[in-house]
């Protein structure tokens, strides 16, 4: 599985649409195989989505994300875990240990996460509570 996390100064970048760096982590059954950072330069929605897809990303963990960009990624099969904040290493540890559902990583002011499930996403069906939703 290839996980992508937006980064800014060691933290999850607050807005994916304008994030400048993406940490790519290859995982196998929760164990990290490799990681590297790539730049994200174009803020245009279709180009940014195309770039992420070209990297072979299976799951994206990010802060806020525009609905059009999230929908493009989700319809292409990328699981988007939006409205996440915190230190990148803590979020990564929480994800690999199945603990990313904790409220501690939810952006302030957000009471729910938005998450698409690939092609089956449809209006209203993507909103779920954080409990048991992300692993």
Image (cartoon, rainbow, N blue to C red):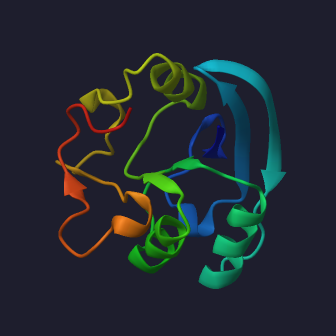
Query: In front: 100, or 41?
Result: 100
In the rendered image, the vertical position of residue 12 relative to residue 80, given as above or below: above
At x 17% / y 70%, what residue is drawn?
124
* Quadrant (top left, top right, bottom left, bottom right) of the C terminus: top left
- Looking at the image, how many numbered discs can be counted on the residues? 0
Query: In front: 44, or 122?
Result: 122
Q: Position of residue 1 (x, y in %)?
A: 65, 37
Q: Position of residue 99 (x, y in %)?
A: 37, 21
Residue 44 makes an appearance in the image: no
In the rendered image, the vertical position of residue 43 relative to residue 93, given as above or below: below
Q: Position of residue 89 (x, y in %)?
A: 60, 24
At x 66% / y 39%, what residue is drawn?
9
At x 59% / y 20%, what residue is drawn?
29
Q: Position of residue 121 (x, y in %)?
A: 33, 68
In the rendered image, the vertical position of residue 126 relative to residue 37, given as above or below: below
47 horizontally vs 116: left or right:
right
132 horizontally vs 44: left or right:
left
Query: In front: 126, or 62?
Result: 126
Quarter assignment of residue 101: top left
Residue 101 makes an appearance in the image: yes
At x 46% / y 33%, what residue is drawn?
86
């Amino acid at each position: 599985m290839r996980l992508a996390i937006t980064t800014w100064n060691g933290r999850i970048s607050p807005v994916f649409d304008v994030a400048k760096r993406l940490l790519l982590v290859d995982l196998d059954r929760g164990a990290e195989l490799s990681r590297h950072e790539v730049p994200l330069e174009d803020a245009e929605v279709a180009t940014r989505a195309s770039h992420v897809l070209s990297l072979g990303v299976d799951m994206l963990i990010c802060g806020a994300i525009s609905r059009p960009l999230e929908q493009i990624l989700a319809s292409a099969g990328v699981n988007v875990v939006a409205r996440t904040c915190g230190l990148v290493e803590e979020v990564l540890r929480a994800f690999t240990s199945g603990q990313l559902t904790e409220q501690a990583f939810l952006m302030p002011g957000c009471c729910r996460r938005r998450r698409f499930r690939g092609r089956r996403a449809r209006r209203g069906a993507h909103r779920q509570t954080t409990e048991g939703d992300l692993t």
